[in-house]
Image (tube, helix red, strand yellow):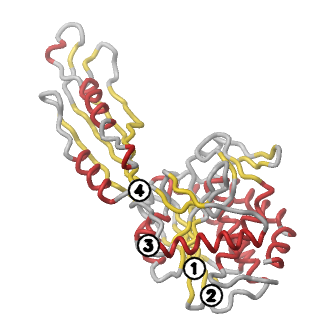
Amino acid sequence: MKNIISYLQQHSDDILSDIKTLVAAESPSMNKAAVDRCGNVLQALFAERLGIDAEIDVQEHYGNHLKFTLGSGDDQTVVLGHFDTVWDEGELPMGEEDGKFYGPGILDMKAGLVQSIWAARALKEHDLLAGKRIVFLCGSDEEVGSPSSSEWLSRHALGSSQVLVVEPAVAGTGALKVARKGTGQYQIVITGQAAHAGNNPEEGISAVQEMAHQVLFLHGLNAPDRGTTVNVGIAQGGNRINVVADKAVLGIDTRVTSEEEAQRIHAEITQIQPHLPGIKLKITGAQSRPPMRQSAESLAIMQRAQAVAQQIGFSVEGQSVGGGSDGNFTAALDIPTLDGLGATGAGIHARHEHIIIADIASRTALVAGLMLGEDHVAG
């Protein structure tokens, strides 16, 4: 790996420059025009650094998904990532301070995408891609649950020998992500009957009162001993202080470690009944991502990652995390999957989101080593 490491260290400023370019192309998930503009920037980077063009999967409501293929061998590695972010345009500034670079989506996960491009470039420049095919699947809607990309990426990942997910490493430890919880999102719309809160409250049916009962029920579904969490993150109701509320809305996030728990939680939520007479409930949503479990084959990739990291000059461990990613989908297809191979840093979905500049070259080299599969570069 020495030649690869040296090459990437020499180009660390170029890698950071490309990261800044991609981060500057802001791409909030629900702004298709902005996401597609960012996709155009990403295409330009692939063309400049690897000389390859995108196969574009056109979307009506979300940004277009992009597939890039390097090489034509039988041994296929998929690099998985997304270029949408949780930040509205202009909401989060870019800047460098104390060896960290800050910006919207820089850690989650634009830096990882750029690092994967340069990992492949390093291998290409050293003629190490013979017999290999590297497919980059870049989705545009991961931050909202991958509603339009999950089937697309699963289809293109089938038959791969491994999937490398360039989501960020675990904050603080730099660990890779070997298992993730499955995730779900639900909404409950509560309809009651409005009435004057002073003159005739008995004629009303309070959607807010019903909401309170349902929040307590939903949080009662938590099962920490089974790794299950249910969180009502949105609770909105009523529009006037002197009116019995006739409308309320709950937004619910679920996390599970097993398919059995996913089925239990889905059944519990979708079969909820009103607590108050006269209340109507409209329940929508589903478990959007299956749990990502570490298989024997995925463990083998983790062990190779540790061996490659040792050659580079650092150590790395694996960790289970609560958040979901598109790696959940490929792991559910029994494709060996390793996550957390992107940048190091902290502040995912937070205003202090940043990457550690000093780690860029070494983490890029780690991805390059894993792209080689069973081979290790000695020179």
Q: Count residues near mark 4 (Cα–Cα under 10 Å), then give few for <14, some for 14-19, many for 20+.
A: many
SS of the residue under disc 4 = strand
Name the residue type under label 4. Answer: Gly
Read off the residue under disc 2.
132
Read off the residue under disc 1.
77
Disc 3 and disc 4 in contact, CB within 8 angstroms: no
Question: Disc 1 versus disc 3: distance between alpha carbons?
Answer: 13 Å
Q: Count residues near mark 1 (Cα–Cα under 10 Å), then give few for <14, some for 14-19, many for 20+.
A: many
Q: Count residues near mark 2 (Cα–Cα under 10 Å), then give few for <14, some for 14-19, many for 20+.
A: some
The residue at the point 21 percent across, 38 percent down is: 281
Q: Position of residue 300 (x, y in %)?
A: 56, 75
Name the residue type under label 1. Answer: Thr
Badge number at residue 182:
4
Question: Disc 4 versus disc 2: distance between alpha carbons?
Answer: 31 Å
Name the residue type under label 3. Answer: Ser
Q: Position of residue 320 (x, y in %)?
A: 52, 56
Residue farthest toward the left in the current orientation of the protein:
277
- Out of 111 and 4, give the one closest to the viewer: 4
Give the position of the N terminus as an image quadrant. Answer: bottom right
Residue 232, above or below 117? above
Residue farthest toward the right in the current orientation of the protein:
10
Read off the residue under disc 3.
154
SS of the residue under disc 3 = helix
- Out of 185 and 247, give the one closest to the viewer: 185
Question: Disc 4 versus disc 1: distance between alpha carbons?
Answer: 24 Å
